[in-house]
Amino acid sequence: MEDYHIFDTNILLEKPELLLNYKNILIPVTVLEELDKHKNFGSEEIRYKAREAHRYLEKANINYICDSSSYSLPEGWENKNDNNILKYALEYRATMITLDKNMVEKCKALKIPYVKIENSEKEIYQGCVELNGDENLVNQIHIDIENGINTYGLLENQYLLIHNKDKRVPFEFKYVEGKLIPLRLPPTKIIKAITPRQRCALDLLNNINIPIKIILGCFGSGKTYTSLKMALYHVFEKGNYSNIVCIKNPIGVGERIGYLKGDKSEKIDPFMSSLKQYLIDENIQLSNINEHATFDIPYFIKGMSWNSTYAIVDESEDIDYRTLLMLGSRISKNSCIVFSGDYKQAETKYKKDNAILKLINKLKGNPLVGIIVLDEDVRSEASKVFANLFE
């Protein structure tokens, strides 16, 4: 049986151009009926999108399904359009192409292979594509890539995670120069990832050929921890860099405590405690760490140049766009910069027009840039309770 792809109505309305990237496309009659309904009775915007979807359907190589599926869904699943589309996916053993989160969860429950497409207008670039499948899907993707077919629209340095329903460990690759390559991780005695996306982050941080690294994630996802542990590894174990520079904008959460006494170092030190906790290593003398690690704020960086330096800009969601550009322009040939943060935790003045998101949209796909968004709180079960409430 051929490898088929089924597009749901949502993806046709938002991303109809993707029809031209796939082969063996099946469009159920249910989807056509939904498009006609939107074209005739939707808002002006929806009617336009439905007409645009029909134009792409005419251009693409489509096989239409007009008969009823004989497949039955588990007890309790309602007879509704989305569920009827899933029946066809089961019958034809097809991969579902969607940007609907609920559809993704249903595919997981029914063990249907799926591709979750990002809606650039609503979602940030994640730095990875996650699929559900098995070794047959992996082999087919490799064949397509070798033949110059980039079915999933992978960008340079983007990760591909294929969750195997028969195994706990997913297949993991990175798209580089038109090829899929396996991840290259640091030794587990240095640091060990807990989640698949953390493994992607470690691969990115381990790669000295990618000087610009953006690692975002919710609190407790390990973005700062992994970034700083890899800084110690690069400087003290591998000798790839000579210095560590930690940058953080001195913005706090909660009530102000007034002006801080002391010199520059004493004033900024309280803001750096969240970074310093991860630079303690039982295998490295504290005096050596103090000799090679410096802490600063963006205000004092203009005009500086970082040579043989691993620089990390923490809480980068609380820095304006021009300052982020200034910080990035400090790195020399033999240095790297890591932007770490969580756009959802941005302070009020940076929330509406967040600079780190703007930077991601400008830099994604650049061969000198790697991006990954960590999506799971691994700090504790209690921490997850609050992470899930955070808006």
Image (cartoon, rainbow, N blue to C red):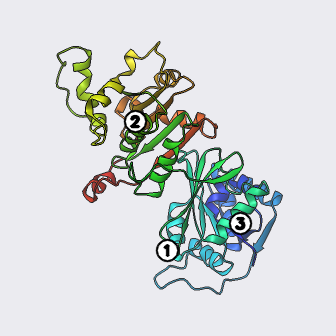
Q: Is residue 287 left or right of residue 358?
A: left
Quarter of the image with the N terminus in it = bottom right
Which image quadrant is residue 270 in? top left
Q: Which residue position is annotated with label 3?
A: 140
Front-most of 127 and 32?
127
Q: Is residue 210 visible?
A: yes
The three-letter code of the residue at mark 3 reads: Gln
Q: Residue at x 53, y 21 (%)?
A: 329
Q: Nearer the viewer, mark 2 or mark 3?
A: 2
Q: Real-space Cα distance between discs 2 and 3?
A: 42 Å
Q: Are marks 2 and 3 in contact (CB under 8 Å)?
A: no
Front-most of 237 and 375?
237
Q: Residue at x 59, y 35 (%)?
A: 363
Q: Secondary structure at mark 1?
A: helix
Relative vertical location of residue 197 with respect to residue 307 in this rendering, above or below? below
Relative vertical location of residue 290 with respect to residue 279 in this rendering, above or below? above
Q: Which residue position is annotated with label 2?
A: 236
Relative vertical location of residue 195 with respect to residue 71 in this rendering, above or below? above
The three-letter code of the residue at mark 2 reads: Phe
Q: Position of residue 201 (x, y in %)?
A: 48, 47
Q: Is residue 207 left or right of residue 256?
A: right
In the image, which disc is placed on residue 109?
Answer: 1
